[in-house]
Amino acid sequence: MTRALAFFFSLILTNALIGQSKIQGTVNYASEGVPYVKVKIKALNMNTLTNLAGEFTLDSVPNGEHEIEFFAFGYAIKTEKIKTPIRELSIELEKELQDVEEVVVSGTLKEVSKKESTVNIEVYSSKFFKKNPTPSVYESIGNVNGVRPQLNCNICNTGDIHINGLEGPYTMVLIDGMPIVSSLSTVYGLTGIPNSLVERIEIVKGPASTLYGSEAIGGIINVITKKPENASLFSADVFTTSFLETNTDLGIKLNVGKKSSVLTGINYFKYDFKRDDNQDGFTDVTLQDRISVFQKWNFKRKNYRLFSIAGRYLYEDRWGGEMDWNNQYRGGDSLYGESIYTTRYELLLNYQLPMKEKIFVSGSFNHHNQNSYYGNTAFMAKQIIGFGQLHWDKKIGRHDIILGSAIRYTQYDDDTPATQSADSLAPKNMPSKSWLPGFFIQDEIKFNKKHKLLLGMRYDHNSDHGSIFTPRLGYKWMINPSTIFRVNTGTGYRVVNIFTEDHAALTGGRDVVIASDINPEQSYNGNINFNKSFITKKNKYLNIDFTAFYTYFTNRIIADYDTDPNFIFYENLSSHAISQGLSLNVTAKVIRNLSIQAGATYMDIATYEEGVKEQQILTENFTGTWGVSYAIPKSNLSIDYTGNVYSPMRLPLLNELDPRAEYSPWWSIQNIQLTYRGIKNWEIYGGVKNLLNWTPNKNTPFMIARSEDPFDKDVQFDAGGNAIATADNPYGLTFDPSYVYAPNQGIKGFLGVRYNIEGKKKK
């Protein structure tokens, strides 16, 4: 009887299972398994996730025809129709173009997955910057959280780039990993990088001195240009604004024979319409005539070894000043104008040696010439920088090692006291020359799939300042494929160039005083990063990236505006300075066709002298950015709404009688853009910039001090050189245009077109 019952129940169970199957398979990208892919049969409400090897199993699937959907962030959704029973599936995913790309190079000098990098690197594609089109890289990065282009002069509109509140000299700008942009070019060279050739921009916030050396205390901005073989055959992007600013970007790719390709980019920007909306008698924005030509050659070699050469030429003529000024007044004291001619040449080389080991030679050279007058003050400056590097990329077991040696030569000469010789028998101005040889080693130790340790060390010997040692330590814990924890710490240093310390030294009536011998700055840095992604069953996506950062400075170089309104004093801080804060970035795609990127950074940037804390000038405590994009269904239209907001910052006043506010108000620049993509190869876009019509002159009696007397002809001074309050000068001021923190342009419209002919791209 027992046997009969067992047979009966087994027969029932067998019949119940008849018509059901198990579906197994692997989801891959580039022959590697993709973990945590959602595998879903929507009609049956069945789903699962792939494991770390990209494998999945769906049990008890009824026999018949089914549609399976495969979804992972960063990849295009894949749909596969099957008929059960079936053997194992093998699914190959394709990358989907996202605002944030997956590959980075700035942390290890080689391409690695962003998730695999021990160093937290923010990566922004060209698509990100098209949401708010601008004529230069310098202006584009204003939409990146924690990164702010800072205007330093109301007249010539010079600027630098702040990362997490640290001023421009602490930011190192690279092109394809080469230290092309520095010193003089941090002020004028950034505006000539063609956006059409930018593939992506990588930003490292925090210490990067181990791999990149001097000037990388605050972080690096690495502009990665397109590879010629993957670029469009032809691209054009032309736009103009209601202020009559016109920008043209052209890109052309040619194949030269079977083993080489060349990409040429041309950028031309023109603005020659005088405008004085704030009625101070001076141009609101500099007039500019700028051309930049960039060319990059790639050569095919055996075993895909790297060989590329690139060059760039930049010429710019810009001026700002009194509305009646023209070139005949250049250098005179009749009408005030700041006129700058910039000529710049750059060359870059990347070459992999023809041997089994991965050994690379890279180098760069740039020559920057500036011919300028600030009123009747001539400033002639030349700079030559040569850089060479040899590094070996080697994997030994769990160790991923980068070993290299670099040398940097800098020749700099200008009209400031920075290059004056102390020897009275020598010429008044002597070029400043320095050599900076060094070597570095970095070892990334992979204990397992979850844990990595990064150890780095760099030694440099500066011909003026001697030996400098900068260690580095990093740790990455991949808690799971959607959750990453990183810690990075290290030291940094910066060799000084006065011109980059503060451009206000050249404009207006202030003179530069170097109080004592200035030593290199030292810093001790640390940051903690936490990154978490959420993917719902309905393919909605949310990413949260949180960072806490801290930097302690010794020998901090301070520009003292407050002691005397006629001078800027430079000296090393006798005590210390700090830069600390919190940063949060959020990316969300929770509604179909709608994507949101938002960020906020809180900063405390201050100096300590004799126990007194003072907030850094022209530095906000809070900054926020956002970008909202919506693709209107079935219309070929999309809308982009971008903006930023800044908290008050301390501004440079001339004296206690100065009637202008000591702190700026809260302010925000917001933009909206509409893009139409309904014509093959074409995009038409337009919109409004600065929707709130914000300009810094609102609620301020004046922006430029003594704009009616730019040469201080009617200013009376006491025996100590201080301006005296008189009936014609009730506040005792001198001419000074350094009271600036935001663009002077109000609301404006823009309209542009893009034309693109794609070539055959390689993976």
Image (cartoon, rainbow, N blue to C red):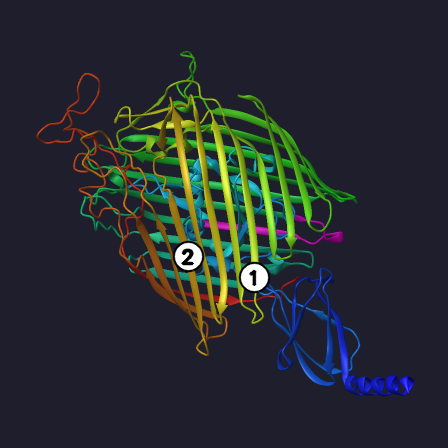
The quadrant of the rendering that contains the N terminus is bottom right
- The residue pinned by badge 2 equals 626
Tally of numbered discs: 2
Q: How far from the left and from the top, in percent, is residue 431?
A: 46, 24
Q: In the visual, does 421 lie left or right of 660? A: right
Q: How far from the left and from the top, in percent, is residue 558?
A: 39, 27
What amino acid does circle 2 point to? Trp
Q: How far from the left and from the top, in percent, is residue 703?
A: 23, 41
Residue stretch in magenta? 292-307
Mark toward the viewer: 2 or 1: 1
Residue drawn at (74%, 79%) of the image = 60
Image position of 337 with respect to 724: above or below: below
In this rendered view, identify the residue nearer to me: 658 or 138: 658
Residue drawn at (50%, 33%) of the image = 384
Quarter-wise, where is residue 715 in the image? top left
- The residue pinned by badge 1 equals 534
In the rendered image, residue 262 lying in the magenta stretch gets the answer no
